[in-house]
Amino acid sequence: MTTGTVFFALLLYAATLLGVAGLAWRIRDYARTPAPLKIPTTPAPTTTGGVVLRMMREVFLFESLFKANLWIWLFGWMFHVSLALVLARHLRYFTEPVWFWVGWVQPFGMYGGLAMVVGLAGLWARRFLVERIRYISTPSDHLMLVLLLGIGISGLSMKFLDHTDIVSLKAFALGLILFDWQPLPAHPVLYVHLFLVALLIGIFPYSKLLHAPGLFFSPGRNQSDNPRERRHLADWAAKLEKAKL
Amino acid sequence: MAAAPITAPPIKPYPVIPILEAGAMAGTKSFPANAQIQEALGFPGELVEDWHDKAIDKMGELLGKYRSLKVYLDACVHCGACTDKCHYFLGTGDPKNMPVARQDLLRKVYRRHFTWSGKLFPKLVGAEDLTKDVLDDWYSYFNQCSECRRCSVFCPYGIDTAEITMAAREIMDSIGLGTKYTNEIIGKVHKVGNNLGLPGPALEDTLSSLEEDLKEETGLDIRIPLNEKGAEVLLITPSADFFAEPHVYSLMGYAKVFHAAGIPWTLSTYASEAANFGMFIGNYGQMQKIATRVREAVLDLGAKRLVVGECGHAWRAAYSFWNTLIGPFDFLDPNYPVPQHICELTYDLIQRGAIAFDKSANDKYVVTFHDSCNVARGSRMGGMPGGQFEIPRAIVRAVANKFVEMYPDSIREKTFCCGGGGGILTDDLMEVRVKGALPRMEALQAVVDSDGVNFMATICAICKAQFSKVLPYYKFNMSMVGGVHQLVGNAIRLGPK
Ligand code: HEM
Ligand code: SF4
Ligand code: SF4
């Protein structure tokens, strides 16, 4: 077992723990915080089914963003769809035998990697070129894009320039899942790639990446528009009411 | 402040995103409330000694009470989609009037005190301590947001700056920093029953003189009843309807509708106000206390239906919040929605053929319709999403021959606030009001030029007051604005059918 293997195995475990535990804590916190008033941005669906549809349009199509700004939508949507494809493609390292649909997305995943980098580059360019967005950008906004670009570019360069030993890598990945460690190929670009990925997973719940779970908890989007038909009362508001009676 | 004359920004043929002018509006501040006003609402009379800790504590309390606040402070990715959506930014160019930048004033303190990243790496994530300068910015810019929710339409996560503004105002109130305009008015409602502080006898006088006007105009005994027990409908309307122009014309319009349809109705002195400024300061308790007068009045008068007059935020409060705050309304007639908007009532009568119109009475007008922000994005009318857009338009079309829409990005859910909502409708913020009206004025100018529009109908007391004041700055006639029920009143057929 090389130092590299041990280091990355421990790093990835730690990052996953930090990421998953943090995410669970945030989600639990969101779920437990009451929404005392009906505040969907109207016009809003009047039924739960309608809300599910609205949410799906936001998650898969970025509907509101589309209405707001075509450039952000274009680069943002391109980046996210590509990211989803790339993640799906990566499942081949974690499944044995490889699930049939993971096999299908392989070629798309490859273009996805390229499109992801283009999308990220577009988003990053906006942070320099558009005065308003330059004004609101913090260092972490830039670094988040750099991090994802770093992941994308190191990944692509292993695909197109400097191949690594995929077979051993898969053994390493499966080994992590089964707690039966296998050696990680000693490959500098792979080291960079994995390090950045660990960083991304680790900071997920402590950064603006909370937008992903946040969307599902946004009262402006997840509430149905039926305040006249159904009385909506949060616990603390109900207690207030009781205390007054 | 020095009385430099306020000039309106130039109207451009199409909206242009302004170049940033940092700090342009930093010095424009709503007059602070004095100790007497503050203490009447249970707030500290002046900035408390330990304001920093108190403010952070209050923020923590609100984070536990409002999921909106917590999720919205976490979720923003600084994508920038909202940056050019606020009328105050478009009118002033001040970057802190961009919705996300306005939120960031609160967010940076949230990050510093409530997130690990902000505690460990403040510079990296844009976290900052709550200094006196930051507090000054809060006071300036959270009192330059009309809580119109336009930004929330465009944000990919529905982040609603209005929620952030409300939280910020609640925090500021709790440490002694309220605004004179809003908090004084809330005090008046608690004391007298309406925002104007119009006592019962004065209200009675005003209404009977309006009845005389109606008699003169129509030759009929059209009543505007007050405190009449057993009337079927209790109408709750903004108090501006009782005396301000053009608001009174809508009140007379409602009276004509009730008269023509033969529906017994009444106003109440005790609850002579539809507006609920408790919403503007994000204060649940104040909002509930104001609304409670309505519940008490309807029970006391024994009315069977609750109808709300033309007012935007009042309709949001009534439609979206009353059931929560002062419901349930199981003692009212279940055949009608509770509460019901006056436009829903009129529309329903039109559908049933219970009232009829002589449209030519409005032929002097080419009408356009300004969607009021709170109606458009915080409420509904009728059974279908979007009824709040269709129903008022259907009424206008039923009572006037010439109707023109303003450009699509300025109406319906994308409507621009008049510039005076959310507690901004005060003379000390005149500059904010004039500049914030720019996007609406540009849209209006376009239809004035293309179609000769000379009447902008709306269903909000604040819109009416704001436009009456601001239209002249843009070289329009102030009487171009009026209520939908003003048009209804012009055209409705009265007398024996
Ligand atoms: C439910 C899943 C998700 C949804 C609906 C979603 C949606 C969005 C939207 C609408 C934007 C704004 C547009 C843009 O700038 O791209 C955005 C930004 C962003 N998203 Fe996501 N996202 C999701 C998951 C993720 C994940 C898993 C990651 C990364 C691991 C991610 C990373 C980012 C980043 C870094 C930005 C900011 C881009 C910038 O700086 O301009 N998102 N997301
Ligand atoms: S709620 Fe309206 S006024 Fe406030 S920031 Fe958003 S768009 Fe501007
Ligand atoms: S649109 Fe939403 S996520 Fe994007 S910057 Fe504005 S508030 Fe933040």
Image (cartoon, coloured by chain):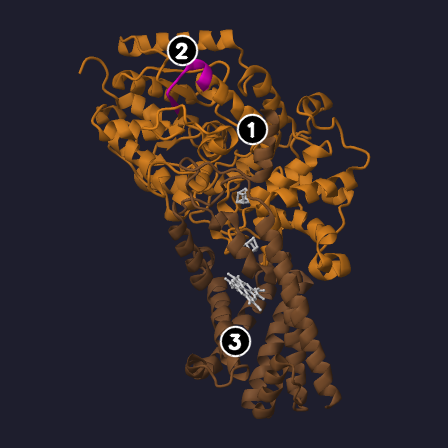
Chain colours: A brown, B orange
Toward which corner of the image does residue A101 lie, by quadrant? bottom left
Chain letter for mark 1: B
Whether the residue under disc 3 has CB within 8 Å of ligand 1: yes
Name the residue at 56% across, 65% down. A126
| Amino acid on which disc 2 is placed | Lys
- For the residues beneath circles 1 and 2, the answer to whether they share a chain is yes
The residue that mark 1 highlights is B288
| Amino acid on which disc 1 is placed | Gln
Report, in whole angstroms, how far the alpha carbon at label 1 lies from the one at label 3: 49 Å
**Magenta stretch, residue numbers:** B298-306
Name the residue at 55% across, 67% down. A123
| Amino acid on which disc 3 is placed | Leu
Q: Position of residue B37 (x, y in %)?
A: 68, 22
Chain letter for mark 2: B
The residue that mark 2 highlights is B229
Residue A245 is left or right of residue A48, and the answer is right
Check the image and report above or below for A188 versus B125: below
